[in-house]
Image (spheres, helix red, strand yellow):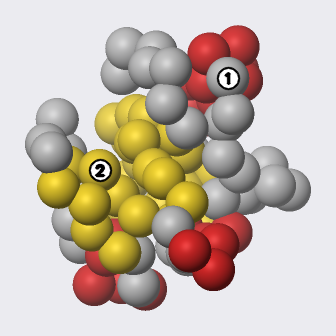
Amino acid sequence: MSKIVSARCVLAANRPSDGVEVFLDFEGAWNENIREAVVAQSPDEGRALEDRGAYDASHNLVVEPRLIEVREADGGELTLRVGGDEHPLDGKQAAGLFVRAT
């Protein structure tokens, strides 16, 4: 599982049935759309997301849960931070950036 970061983050994992990237949403379900993901605003919230990911992984609901750092750009759009670069997130094309991230 990821180390806790002070930045805003979402919980990502892969669905066991097909390996598709999914994100934990506000209702506690795993959703393919990152725009529906719950965003941790603090280290405590990040730890809670990690705990949920570990629980769901132990029950074979997801594999490889991890925290992904995101930022909110103008207009509320989430961007993914990879290295020093910002990447706008747009549907499955953006989700592909996460697959098998380390």
| Picture layout, residue 83 above or below residue 6 | below
Quadrant housing the N terminus:
top left
Judged from the image, the secondary structure of the residue bearing numbered disc 2 is strand
* 29 vs 74, nearest the viewer: 74
Residue beneath disc 2:
81
Residue 74 vs 86, above or below: the answer is below
The quadrant in which residue 68 appears is: top left
Disc nearer the start of the sequence (1/2): 1
* In this rendering, position of residue 99 left or right of residue 66: left
* Residue closest to the far right: 27
Which amino acid, mark 1?
Ser
Q: Callout 1 environment at 10 Å: few (<14), some (14 to 19), or many (20+)?
A: some
Quadrant in the picture for residue 43: top right
Q: Secondary structure at mark 1?
A: loop
Q: Which residue is mark 1?
A: 42
Q: Residue at 65%, 59% (x, y): give it.
A: 37
Task: Residue 78: give x, y in percent of width and height.
Answer: 51, 66
Q: Position of residue 21 (x, y in %)?
A: 38, 63
Instruction: Determine if residue 41 is in view.
Output: yes
Which residue occupies 29% across, 50% down? 81
- Please provide percent x and percent y for residue 39: 66, 46
Q: Is residue 62 above or below residue 48?
A: below
